[in-house]
């Protein structure tokens, strides 16, 4: 065997050596992209729902106005804006804030799919005037496949890592 | 491997840093809007820096380097409010400027600094 033949290498062996880490990298990149997309989607949806609440305050029940809304209305908007987000994996907290912009006067916490049937009027009476604030906090459980690559020798079923994505908005009531 | 690894390391560092920088850009924009929305309520709120600071800090508090009790008058966060007598449409407006310094990250020599200042100004017509 000549020196050149000895140095030709093995395509199968080298593909195996290089392919395994590259597969990890590719899946990791895809998972990071999905995670970032969901994080952004949640934040956008929360801000949209917050803006919706700020335009449905006390003035909605003034005179002949009948545009008052409930938790379920804001939750439905949130769910429809949060494209690709599983409502059963998201917890939503609605806070009504006093005119000092910090004191929480009323709170409703529910899973997003349950929020969609909650008939509590929101923002609540007495804290729905322009000058009061509304706040929405969400927590979304992102199931990432990133962590399945470190189960340890002899591990059993594939374990998916859990990451919590927050969403937040705090806005002043306008109408 | 030895030749390629530095490129991969710098690519990773660049992507990691830009993730934080983009987050700072978006958060600063959101902070300025939230503060301006409050400031535009009246000519009194238009110069209410303390409350504008509360709104801006709320939007930026996810960022690791913004202290909980910030007054928005020292790094990493500055918030200034102004009453504009004649805004873009000739009517009185509130103007809020939010300036934020990102956390200290990993620099790439000659290409990417370890920290950036981001500044956004939002002007909104007074509602009353």
Image (cartoon, coloured by chain):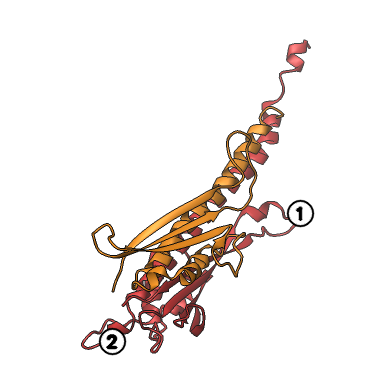
Chain colours: A red, B orange
> Circle 2 sits on which residue?
A61
Q: Quadrant of residue A55?
A: bottom left
Give the side of residue A148 with respect to residue A100, left or right.
Answer: right
Q: Nearer the viewer, residue B112 or B23?
A: B112
Secondary structure at numbered mark 2: helix
| Residue A167 visible in this rendered orientation of the protein | no
Q: How many marks?
A: 2
Q: Which mark is residue B19?
A: none
Q: Which mark is residue A152?
A: 1
Extreme-front residue of the structure: B85
Residue B1, how many percent across, how many down? 70, 30
Residue A27, how many percent across, how many down? 59, 47
User: Do discs 1 and 2 share a chain?
Assistant: yes
Tell me the CA gap for discs 1 and 2: 60 Å
Secondary structure at numbered mark 1: loop
Residue under the image location 72 percent in, 29 percent down: B2
Q: Chain of mark 1?
A: A
Residue B39, how many percent across, how many down? 39, 69
Q: Nearer the viewer, residue B113 or A164?
A: B113
Q: Quadrant of the N terminus of chain A?
A: top right
Residue under the image location 30 percent in, 63 percent down: B85
Work out whether mark 1 precedes mark 2 in sequence or the reverse, and give the earlier one.
Answer: 2
Give the side of residue A142 with respect to residue A121, left or right.
Answer: right
Q: Quadrant of residue A63?
A: bottom left
Q: Residues within 10 Å of mark 1 (few under 14, many from 20)?
A: few
Q: Nearer the viewer, residue A96 or B67?
A: B67
| Residue A158 visible in this rendered orientation of the protein | yes
Residue under the image location 47 percent in, 72 percent down: B51
Image position of A135 with respect to A42: above or below: below
């Amino acid at each position: 065997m000549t020196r050149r033949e000895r140095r030709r290498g093995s395509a199968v062996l080298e593909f195996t050596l290089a392919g395994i880490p590259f597969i990890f990298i590719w899946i990791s990149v895809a998972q990071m992209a999905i995670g970032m997309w969901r994080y952004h989607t949640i934040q956008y949806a929360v801000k949209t729902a917050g803006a919706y609440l700020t335009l449905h305050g006390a003035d909605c029940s003034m005179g002949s106005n009948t545009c008052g809304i409930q938790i379920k209305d804001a939750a439905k908007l949130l769910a429809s804006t949060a494209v690709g987000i599983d409502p059963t994996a998201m917890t939503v907290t609605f806070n009504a804030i006093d005119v000092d912009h910090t004191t929480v006067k009323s709170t409703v916490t529910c899973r997003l799919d349950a929020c969609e049937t909650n008939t509590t009027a929101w923002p609540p009476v007495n804290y729905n005037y322009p000058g009061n604030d509304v706040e929405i906090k969400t927590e979304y459980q992102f199931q990432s496949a990133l962590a399945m690559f470190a189960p340890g020798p002899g591990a059993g079923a594939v374990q998916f890592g859990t990451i919590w994505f927050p969403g937040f908005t705090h806005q002043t009531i306008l109408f | 491997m030895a030749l390629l690894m530095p490129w991969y390391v710098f690519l990773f560092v660049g992507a990691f840093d830009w993730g934080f920088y983009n987050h700072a850009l978006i958060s600063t924009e959101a902070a300025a809007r939230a503060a301006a929305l409050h400031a535009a309520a009246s000519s009194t709120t238009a110069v209410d820096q303390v409350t504008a600071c509360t709104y801006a800090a709320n939007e930026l508090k996810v960022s690791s380097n913004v202290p909980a009790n910030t007054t928005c008058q020292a790094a990493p966060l500055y918030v200034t409010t102004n009453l504009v007598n004649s805004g873009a449409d000739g009517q009185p407006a509130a103007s809020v400027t939010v300036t934020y310094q990102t956390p200290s990250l990993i620099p790439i020599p000659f290409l990417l600094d370890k920290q950036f200042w981001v500044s956004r100004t939002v002007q909104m017509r007074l509602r009353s």
